[in-house]
Image (spheres, rainbow, N blue to C red):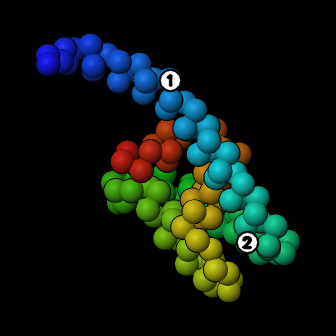
Amino acid sequence: MHFDLDVISKALQTLLDATLPVLAGMAAFWLRAKYDEMRARLDEQKRFALDTTVRTAIYAAEQLKLSGIVESKLGYVTNLVEQRAIDLGLSLSADEVRALIEAAVKQNFGKFPEFGNPSQG
């Protein structure tokens, strides 16, 4: 039995091209649901504190990355948000923290592609 690797490669590429946008959309929908669920559990004061922390951390991470002080903006912001949640007496999952960050980037900063891809940020 002979397999034409070029044909198989093209078929797999076509399959990936068709499924990746759907999977990305599903992931975005899931993150948004996690974000909404987490925010529903918080009172107004804690929501404000977390929102402010996330926005400030994102601004700081952008500047620190440009200055070469931090390697991973996402890691920097994640650590700050997790610590602030603990300070507020909140128990947030890693998915909820990520949803907070992604929502803040989308709502307040337009698109920072390097935030969306942990290998780049």
Q: Which residue is mark 2?
A: 49
Q: Which residue is mark 1?
A: 18
Which x, y percent locates residue 101? 60, 57
Tell which circle, 1 or 2, labels the residue nearer the N-terminal end: 1
Q: Observer-nearest residue: 55 or 38?
A: 38
Vertical side of 32 occupied by 22: above or below: above
Taking the image as shown, residue 37 lies to the left or right of residue 55, namely right
Cβ atoms at labels 1 and 2 below 8 Å apart? no
Q: Observer-nearest residue: 70 or 3?
A: 3
Vertical side of 2 occupied by 57: above or below: below
The type of residue carrying mark 1 is: Ala
Q: Is residue 57 visible?
A: no
Name, please, the residue furthest toward the right: 44
Q: Residue at x 62, y 64 (%)?
A: 96
Q: Nearer the viewer, mark 1 or mark 2?
A: 1
Which x, y percent locates residue 110? 64, 38
The local crowd at label 1, few if under 14, some if 14 to 19, many if 20 or more residues have their Cα within 10 Å, is: few
The type of residue carrying mark 2 is: Ala
Q: Residue at x 61, y 37 (%)?
A: 25
The local crowd at label 2, few if under 14, some if 14 to 19, many if 20 or more residues have their Cα within 10 Å, is: few
Disc 1 secondary structure class: helix
Vertical side of 89 occupied by 116: above or below: above
Disc 2 secondary structure class: helix
Residue 85 in which image quadrant: bottom right
Which x, y percent locates residue 106? 65, 44
Cα–Cα span, label 1 and label 2: 40 Å
Vertical side of 68 occupied by 6: above or below: above
Taking the image as shown, residue 41 lies to the left or right of residue 83, namely right
